[in-house]
Each structure stands twice: as C-alpha cells, then as structure tokens.
Amino acid sequence: MNMKKRYITLLLVAALLLGFAGAFLGVKLAQPDQSPAGDQQASVDTSGEISSQPPENMQKVVQTYNLIKKHYLEDIEDKQLIEGAIKGMVTSLDDPYSSYMDVETMQQFNETIESSFEGIGAEVSMVNEKVTIVSPIKDSPAEKAGLRPNDQILSVDGESVAGLSLNEAVEKIRGKKGSEVVLEIQRSGVSEPFDVTIERDDIPVETVYSEVKSIDGKKTGVIEITSFAENTAEHFNKQLKSLEKKNIEGLVIDVRGNPGGVLSSVEGILKNFIPKDIPYVQIEKQNGEADKSYSNLSEKKPYPISVLINEGSASASEILAVAMKEVGYDVVGTKSFGKGTVQQAVPVGDDGSRVKLTFFKWLSPKGNWIHEKGVKPTVKVKQPEYYFTNPVQVEEPLTYDETGDSVKSIQVMLKGLGYNPGRTDGYFSKDTKAAVENFQADHDLKVNGKVNEKTAGTAETSVVERIRNGQDDKQMTNALDALYE
C-alpha cells in the first residue's frame, strides 16, 4: 500500500485491557463512579474498605510481614513487601491481562496511550507461561526484524525470561532509542531457537492511514488502523468523511496486526456502520447481565465493506470485526487472536499505582464470546508462504546436497522472489543451487551457489521489502474483490 506509514515503537504489553502498554482496550483509569467502558456505568470503590469480613487466614499475611521485618537477615523496606504482596495476589489470579502497575509502569502506560514510545514495537502477552508476540506493530523495528504473531521470547540479551512476569519481561525488552536488544525466539514449526537483533526506536503514534484505489474502474477506499489509541476514532471518522467526499463505491477496513487498544475508540468507529436496531458491543458483568451499546445510525452505508483480519488482530480489532461480520459484512483473512475480556485500571494507595483487573467480558452483537476462539473470517485467505519464512542464521555456508530448516527457508524466500529453487522441502538440490546463483548475480553478490551470511541477509531484506510494498497481498486482493462480487 502506498500510504504514509509510521510505527509505534513500544514493546506493548499484551492484548491487555483489550491491550496493555499502548492501547489497553477497555481499560479506563478508574475513579469512583467512572464509566469503565463506553456507555457502561459502574462505580469502583477505591477506598480500600471491603463489604465483608476478611478471611480468617488473612492474619497469615500480617504474621509473615512481621516475621520478615523482625528476623530477616537484611533490612527490607515496607514498600517492597507491600508491593510484593499485591503482585502476588494479582498473579495468583492466573489471568495474563490482570496486573499490578507501579508508578513507573503507569507512566509508561500513559505514554503509550497518549504520545510516543521507545521500544521495539510489538504487543506481547503471556500464553501458557511463555512471553509471546501477539502482533508486531506495522512498520515497527519488530516487524522489520521479522518477528511474527505467536513467536515466543525465550531470553533477552542472553538472560532467560522464564519465571518472570509479563511486566518484568517487558522491562528487559524496552529501552532507549538507538540501543539494540537481542531476543532469542522460538517459532512454531522451527526445531531450534534463533536470535533476532532489533534496534529500538522512538516514533509518535499515528494509528489511521487511508487511500483510494481504483478497482475495475470503481473508487475504493482503504483505511488501515494499526492500533486503537485515544484519538483513533476521531482520526478515522475524519478520513472516512474525506473518502466519502471523493465518492468511494466500496471500503476496506484493515486491522491486520492491530493488537487492540482503547474501547471507546472502537466504539466511536462502529457507530458509523452498525444500525441502531442491533448493539455494536455488549459488556457482560459478574452477575451475567449484559449492557448493550447502540448507535444512532438509521441504516447501513450505501456501499459494500470488507474487513481484513489475521492472527495478530486482537481485542478492539476483534470487537470491530465480529460486529461487522454479524451485520452481514465480509471479514477476510485468517482467524484472529481471541481476547474477549475488558480490564480496568483502579488506583490503589495514593502514589499513582494501579491494579489492572479483568472486570468484564465483551460479547458480540449477537451475544457470542470469542475469547480464546478468535473471529473466523467469512472469506479465509492465507498469505503466500514466503510471508512466513524464518530468519536464516548462517555459521557455515549452506551448499549443495545439504538439508535442514535453513535450506527450506532460503528455498521459500527464493521462490517468493521469483527464483525457482526446484523444491521447498529443505534439500539443497542442483535447482536450488542454480536459483541461488541467479539471485546472487542479480544482487551483485559473489556467484558461487552457496548461501553465506551476506546472501541470506540480502534474501531476507528483499522478502521484507516485497511484503512491505504490498506485493502478492492475497488478503487485500480478496478483500477488494469481495466488495464487488
């Protein structure tokens, strides 16, 4: 796509609050009687008082505190013990989207929603106790380095993240613009972990990009939403009006790789498309009751609309996709991430710390809960195989008659770049050698048919550039085609 693109360079923490550290979908910085989500009305008691008597064994907490203060070998500050107890309680919930945010973490949270970030530009979550990429942000350092959804981060700069909380792992990955971080990645389908070196960056948040395409002589609008920040709905609505003034005859909304964000933003967007006789989202409370939110829209848009999703589309992106799907619009791509809960960040104490806690489920217009299931597209389309090739780490050049995952990755890359390797099963055949030689000749490399570090790096860079330029984007092609079938 020929849009002006920028990237969010923060290591976003999870699909929290419908996203953490950059757009917590559904997360509100709660105060008493503040609405936690859209039109929801709920009060949050932040006084520290509880309506029932504490359990009898709560005294164990006090006894443990006194025991440490009186007898532990070293002096321990009260703050460390208290915050440790809070973190322990929240961790015991076994909910990757609930966490304790101290003052420093809250500052990062606010920066993520409002301005710019320093980091690699990826949303992560804790999946099966593994720090896992939900989605790299479009055009971010993480995406440029080849990270992809469901990659597991094993270590950071040589230090294992096993046993760390999500926030602790994120702290290791974040860093100043221009600095480098080395992540050890385990990828599904790849036998051995591999290292990825990423240079951190600092870029302001721009979340909405639009353009007009001509499809079979028809003016077609394309709006890409990279995340749902506080001002995303405002920017989306302005760009939608601009496209409509250009008399578009169809619209594609692209939320691929969008990890989520602020609930009110996706609500502000859905009000443009979901008629008033059906809720655009439902928020289910602890008692099972669901509050439904409606638009004032009398009827659907006069033009066809398609929504693009993939496995990196999470939380707020899924609210948008499933609502559009259930009112009859096409959803194109692959199944989304699957996050159907809403968090709220509630103040604890008077130092600015907050507990981010799962308060609600969100349900589709028809009352479906997509949590851990994802949104299934109406038109299932996978990208070409080379979109998913793995980085190749070359210690010794790959040569004729060798086998392995690295050979397979090179073969897939060459095929995607228009060179015929003869096969893509990981055997370095004579055809593969000829394809390598042709690639080397076209890129001013030493022509010897061997894949050294320079040849592998050039192939990887060529693939990334091809993907970023939108070449062979089967999902976009099918989304555009679906408009006018």
Image (cartoon, rainbow, N blue to C red):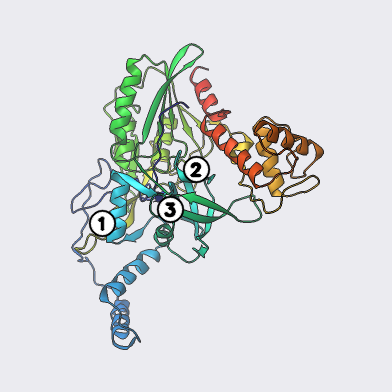
Seen at 51% across and 13% down, the residue is: 216
Identify the element where label 1 is drawn.
Answer: strand
Quarter of the image holding residue 210? top left
Q: Amino acid at mark 2?
A: Glu
Report the residue marked by disc 1. 346
Seen at 19% across and 66% down, the residue is: 49
469 in relation to 175, above or below: above
Identify the element where label 2 is drawn.
Answer: helix
Marks 3, 2: nearer the viewer: 3
Q: Amino acid at mark 3?
A: Ser
Seen at 48% across and 20% down, the residue is: 483
Which disc number belongs to residue 143? 2
Report the residue marked by disc 3. 179
The one nearer the camera, 103 or 274, is: 103
Could you give the CA–CA distance between mark 3 and mark 2, rounded to whole angstroms? Answer: 17 Å
Estimate the x, y position of residue 80 in percent, counting from the top left: 30, 73
Marks 1, 2: nearer the viewer: 2
Q: Earlier in the sequence, mark 1 or mark 3?
A: 3
